[in-house]
Amino acid sequence: MEAPPITENLRFGADYKTREIATTFDFSDFGGISRAAEQCSGVGACRKKLTGTMCPSYMATRDEADSTRGRANALRLAISGQLGADGLTDRELLPLFDLCLECKACKSECPTGVDMARLKSEFLHQYQRRYGSSLRSRLLADVERIARLASRFATLANWVAGNVLVRFMNEKAFGIDRRRLPPRFARETFLDWWSKYQPSQQNWWASLCSGSRPSSWYSTVSYTSSVLKPYDFLSASFAFVFIPSTLPLESSPLAANQFNSSSR
């Protein structure tokens, strides 16, 4: 067998250079975003099909491009300039990251700890800063403010959001599947309900926070019951449960849609 020389087809050849670029996210734990992408050793643990969580998009498509390894290699090639002058904002990277769920399974299951969720967020931030953000991204990033407004006109908002024609237009304009029913909003929010409650006795204080989706506080989706479970436990211990009367806009939708400056 005439195999090629051992010096051919190297990931890091003699001409390879690690380029450092300015980032919004902190990659100092890897030594920079370039080395974060180079963290992939190519063992292919992300190509598992029957066990673990990593990588859910590969399990669905069985396409190397949709694996953590495929994305890391593409990102490394782009940053190092091997895919063209665009680097991290190369348009060819967008479909590669499209199916990444940012579930962070790779961070815990990858043998070398590749953090693809953070890499994707940085890529999309750089990409949108250069080419602009889509209407869909702007809508989803502002979902918290929309939820607050919708709760004031809950009856009208529920009718509009559930209308077949509106759902059809949402699918065409924003890519939101028409079969997906939106959450129903309540005129009396959870915070409104909570403000009427006065505890009878207390021995100590406890703060009950909303978690990562405050827009649920404006919805009728059994969120109240999920909040009351820890509340019942705390109140049984004679605790005064404190919930802020006003909440800042949630930053998770902003960060998820790469409006990172606004989410800080």
Image (tube, rainbow, N blue to C red):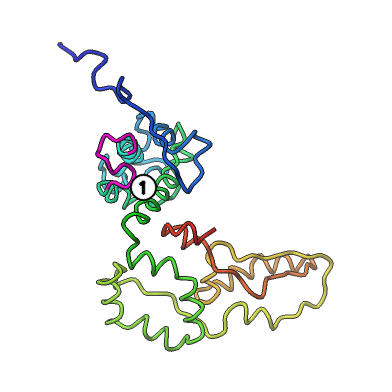
Q: Which residue is mark 1?
A: 56
Task: Give amino acid for label 1.
Answer: Pro
Quadrant (top left, top right, bottom left, bottom right) of the N terminus = top left
Across and down, in percent, residue 18 comes to 38, 30
Q: Is residue 11 magenta?
A: no
Quarter of the image where one finds residue 246: bottom right
Secondary structure character of the magenta stretch overall: loop
Across and down, in percent, residue 155 comes to 45, 88
Image position of 262 with respect to 99: above or below: below
Q: Which residues are magenta?
A: 79-90
Whether residue 264 sits left or right of residue 67 in the image: it is: right
Q: Residues within 10 Å of mark 1 (few under 14, many from 20)?
A: many
View extreme (left): residue: 2
Image position of 202 with respect to 97: above or below: below
Whether residue 121 sits left or right of residue 152 in the image: it is: left
Image position of 174 with respect to 2: above or below: below
